Image (cartoon, grey):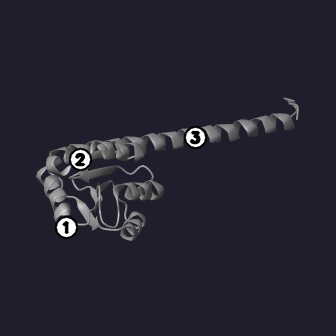
Amino acid sequence: MAARPKLPIIADAEDDAELILHALRRAGFEPDHARIEDADALRAALHAEPWEMMICDHSLPRLDAFTALKMAREIRGDIPFIVVSGVIGEESAVAAMRAGANDYVMKDDLRRLAPAIERELRDAETRRQMREAEDRKSTRLNSSHVVISYAVFCLQKQKLLILPD
């Protein structure tokens, strides 16, 4: 678990960001963070920083969680994304999860935020390790194919093995 996760907090109000930071600090985190308020700033931050995850207020005047989530998926793939809201209804929460959010946490129960972050960081690391293992496997298979092709070529040249064209 990263005790200092690197994350943007997408929130229009400084008070909302401080509420989230306070909950994280009480849980033992000291996040390396930036507060982001609009789509242009989010796009720039997603390209500029190696964020580990994202926390986003559900409803902002210049950006909503669904737009932020879509941008995050387009630019950073499967970066963990947690929606925090004070007024999200069940339908909106379900819609956020279906759209690809990893979790949602109510502002009046931020005790759930730290465990959600820990879980999502752990799951993201597992996904990264699985992708790396798949890449290594693919590389080995491609290398094996090249070796086998070369062996067949050599055998054909030696006329030890004749294969139809």
Quadrant of res 139: top right
Mark 1 secondary-structure assignment: helix
Q: CA distance from mark 1 to mark 3?
A: 47 Å
Q: Which mark is residue 105?
A: 2
Extreme residue in the left direction? 26
Name above or below for residue 64 compared with residue 116. Answer: below
Residue 111 in sight here? yes
Give residue 13's position: percent from left, percent from top: 21, 66
- Between tags 1 and 3, which lies in front? 1
Q: Residue at x 64, y 41 (%)?
A: 142
Q: Is residue 111 left or right of residue 122?
A: left
Q: Residue at x 30, y 68 (%)?
A: 37
The residue type indicated by label 2 comes to: Val
Q: Position of residue 44 (x, y in %)?
A: 40, 69
Q: Mark 3: give few (<14), some (14-19) or many (20+) Cα within 10 Å.
A: few
Between the residue at mark 3 and the residue at mark 2, the CA separation in whole angstroms equals 38 Å
Q: Which residue is mark 1?
A: 14
**Image quarter (top left, top right, bottom left or bottom right) of the C terminus:** top right
Looking at the image, is mark 3 or mark 2 earlier in the sequence?
Answer: 2
Q: Earlier in the sequence, mark 1 or mark 2?
A: 1
Residue 10 or 144: which is nearer the viewer? 10
The one nearer the camera, 90 or 137, is: 90
Q: Position of residue 49 (x, y in %)?
A: 37, 64
| Left or right: where 39 falls relative to 30 | right
Residue positioned 18% across, 51% down in the render: 107
Q: Quadrant of residue 19?
A: bottom left
